[in-house]
């Protein structure tokens, strides 16, 4: 069977053997479209449980521990990293999926892997890498995630990547919506990494992804906003009085003060953030159930063929979400303390790329051999792969060794 066609699993155990009975519009592992490379099925794990396990055990997952969420690793032990963020996204995604009768394992796998493609230093690192890669197709963290799980992870003897299920790959590429066709949600050209992969393994880029992928995307929004408010307050970039009039956030603090009275600031922050998360989850459940009833979907393919997402915030909460994002942009992401580090981060990434491109012999041996065998575009992409895989700590160390005359 051609790689671009689906693989069936007629011998798979019943879905109930792997967990709760699924809704008819959920992704059923027994009906998975399979993997690019055929493998014997596990006798005790579903296809999506196996996806999750491969994600957790791969090198890209471990590197998330020392990759920035907002603060660089050395700025404090209590701020979020990509790893802690991904774990929080996975918890929210599992909770929402269970309440909606969706496949928790698939949603969890997508949540845990969704940030694999991020560079060191968060969005500042990505912006810098995208700029230096502009002549060679740019850099996109979603495309880099696909590249990691299909090519760059080298763990298995008969194929590169993790050989995840079709549904997992679909979710990683399309969790924000279709990327080609009339329903596409992105305006940029299709990244080369995605175009190259789908030439061999069609991921139906013109449709929406499964409800599980949509859940993972909104769980990311919930975790990102609520925990950035948490980190910003703990870092004293802004104070509780500053969010009093902010939709969703202000009411959460007001309700917790009314319920618990004059409690310690750290406790108040914790319960208010928990209240925020709960309110957003409740809204998703209500809005998604309304859309499910309105559309009358009866299968996962019905979900994919809709003209819009089925998992969503209500209009009121979507407006509150936008207000929270705008507040964080102005008061946290553009705070002078954050700006100082992001400015350094952009320089670190840009200077490393330019020097390694001009002198590929400076790359580690396993990367140098691959880079020297390619044309300019291929060498640039290989160097981007190397830098994107760095942790914050490793990137700073490599930069020091390259540019500090006294470093060994």
Image: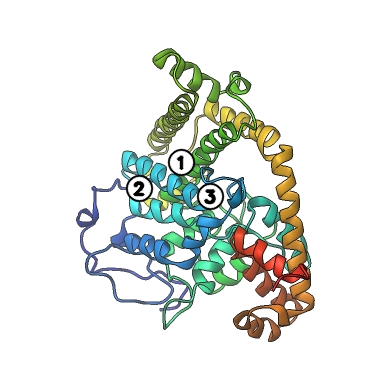
Residue 118 coordinates in the image, percent (x, y): 59, 57
Q: Are marks 2 and 1 in contact (CB under 8 Å)?
A: yes
Name the residue beneath numbered marker 3: 81
Mark before the other along the chain sequence, 2 or 1: 2
Q: Are marks 1 and 3 in contact (CB under 8 Å)?
A: no
Q: Quadrant of the C terminus?
A: bottom right
Q: Residues within 10 Å of mark 2 (few under 14, many from 20)?
A: many
Residue 35 coordinates in the image, percent (x, y): 40, 70
User: What is the secondary structure assignment of the residue under circle 1?
Assistant: loop
Which circle, 2 or 3, is nearer the viewer? 3
Work out how far the residue at label 2 is from the one at label 1, CA to CA, in angstroms.
Answer: 11 Å
Q: Residues within 10 Å of mark 3 (few under 14, many from 20)?
A: many
Q: Is residue 297 above or below residue 394?
A: above
Q: Residues within 10 Å of mark 1 (few under 14, many from 20)?
A: many
For this view, does 14 lie left or right of residue 130?
left
Q: Is residue 83 above or below residue 359?
A: above
Q: Residue at x 78, y 72 (%)?
A: 355
User: What is the secondary structure assignment of the residue under circle 2?
Assistant: loop
Q: How is the image coloured?
A: rainbow
Q: Quick one: 5 or 45, which is closer to the camera?
A: 45
Mark before the other along the chain sequence, 1 or 3: 3
Quadrant in the picture for residue 110: bottom left
Q: Quadrant of the N terminus?
A: bottom left
Mark before the other along the chain sequence, 2 or 3: 2
Name the residue beneath numbered marker 2: 25
Residue 266 coordinates in the image, percent (x, y): 48, 28
Which circle, 1 or 3, is nearer the viewer? 3
Q: Are marks 2 and 3 in contact (CB under 8 Å)?
A: no
User: What is the secondary structure assignment of the residue under circle 3?
Assistant: loop
For residue 85, say whether it is visible: yes
Name the residue beneath numbered marker 1: 310
Residue 346 coordinates in the image, percent (x, y): 74, 56
């Amino acid at each position: 069977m051609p790689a671009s066609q689906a693989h069936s699993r007629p011998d798979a155990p019943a879905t109930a053997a792997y967990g709760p009975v699924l809704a008819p519009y959920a992704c059923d592992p027994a009906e998975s479209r399979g993997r690019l490379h055929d493998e014997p099925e596990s006798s005790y794990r579903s296809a999506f449980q196996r996806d999750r396990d491969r994600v957790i055990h791969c090198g890209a997952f471990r590197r998330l521990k020392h990759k920035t969420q907002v603060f660089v690793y050395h700025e404090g032990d209590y701020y979020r990293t990509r790893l802690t963020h991904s774990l929080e996204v996975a918890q929210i995604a599992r909770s929402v999926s269970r309440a909606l009768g969706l496949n928790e394992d698939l949603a969890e796998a997508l949540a845990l892997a969704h940030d694999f493609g991020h560079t060191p230093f968060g969005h500042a690192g990505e912006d810098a890498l995208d700029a230096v890669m502009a002549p060679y197709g740019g850099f996109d963290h979603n495309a880099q995630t696909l590249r990691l799980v299909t090519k760059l992870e080298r763990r298995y003897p008969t194929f590169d990547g993790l050989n995840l299920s079709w549904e997992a790959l679909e979710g990683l590429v399309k969790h924000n919506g279709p990327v080609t066709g009339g329903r596409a949600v992105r305006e940029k050209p299709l990244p080369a990494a995605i175009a190259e992969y789908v030439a061999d393994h069609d991921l139906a880029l013109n449709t929406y992804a499964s409800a599980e992928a949509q859940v993972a995307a909104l769980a990311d929004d919930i975790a990102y906003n609520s925990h950035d408010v948490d980190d910003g307050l703990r870092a004293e970039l802004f104070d509780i009085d500053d969010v009093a009039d902010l939709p969703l956030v202000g009411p959460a603090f007001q309700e917790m003060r009314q319920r618990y009275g004059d409690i310690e600031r750290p406790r108040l922050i914790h319960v208010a953030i928990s209240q925020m998360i709960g309110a957003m989850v409740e809204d998703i459940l209500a809005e998604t159930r309304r859309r499910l009833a309105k559309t009358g979907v009866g299968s996962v393919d019905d979900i994919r063929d809709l003209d819009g997402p089925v998992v969503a915030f209500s209009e009121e909460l979507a407006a509150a979400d936008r207000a929270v994002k705008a507040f964080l942009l102005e008061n946290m992401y553009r705070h002078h303390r954050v700006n100082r580090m992001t400015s350094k981060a952009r320089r670190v990434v840009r200077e490393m790329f330019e020097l390694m491109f001009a002198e590929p012999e400076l790359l580690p041996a396993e990367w140098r051999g691959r880079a020297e065998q390619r044309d300019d575009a291929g060498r640039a992409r290989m160097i981007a792969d190397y830098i994107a895989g760095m942790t914050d700590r490793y990137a700073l160390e490599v930069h020091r060794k390259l540019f500090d005359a006294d470093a060994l």
